Image (tube, rainbow, N blue to C red):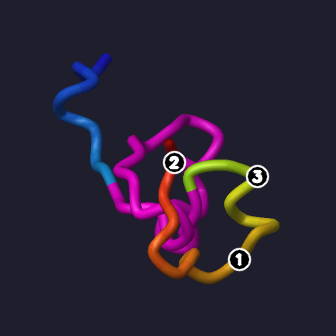
Amino acid sequence: MRKKSELPTKLCAHCQLPFTWRKKWERDWEQVKYCSERCRRAGAPAAGVGHG
């Protein structure tokens, strides 16, 4: 098993926060663009608005 620090990460296309690879994305990691279902539904980057 890999350490969390060794897992690949990406920036969410919506909120611009980094997120880490998950087992459920194993088959389609290349296509994953969003950190969550909420961001995926929201779509493209929020203009100047992040979490918090």
Q: Which residues are magenta?
A: 10-34
Task: Return the residue at label 3.
Answer: 37
- Give, as a three-letter code, the residue at label 1: Gly
Q: What is the spatial separation of the Cα atoms under label 2 and label 3, in whole angstroms?
A: 15 Å
Q: Are marks 2 and 1 in contact (CB under 8 Å)?
A: no
**Relative image position of residue 35 (x, y in whole percent):** 56, 51
Task: Return the residue at label 1.
Answer: 43
The answer to which of 22 and 45 lies nearer the viewer is 45
Residue shown at 31% from the left, 50% from the top: 9
- Is 6 in the magenta? no
Q: Secondary structure at mark 2?
A: loop
The answer to which of 31 and 50 lies nearer the viewer is 50
Q: Are marks 2 and 3 in contact (CB under 8 Å)?
A: no
Q: Earlier in the sequence, mark 2 or mark 1?
A: 1
Give the residue furthest to the right: 41
Task: Return the residue at label 2.
Answer: 51
Compared with residue 16, is residue 38 higher up or lower down, i.e. above or below? above
Residue shown at 27% from the left, 24% from the top: 4
Q: Secondary structure at mark 1?
A: loop
Which disc is residue 35 wearing?
none
- Give, as a three-letter code, the residue at label 3: Glu
Q: Quadrant of residue 16?
A: bottom left
User: Which image quarter is the N terminus in?
Assistant: top left
**Relative image position of residue 25 (x, y in whole percent):** 59, 49
Q: What is the spatial separation of the Cα atoms under label 2 and label 1, in whole angstroms?
A: 15 Å
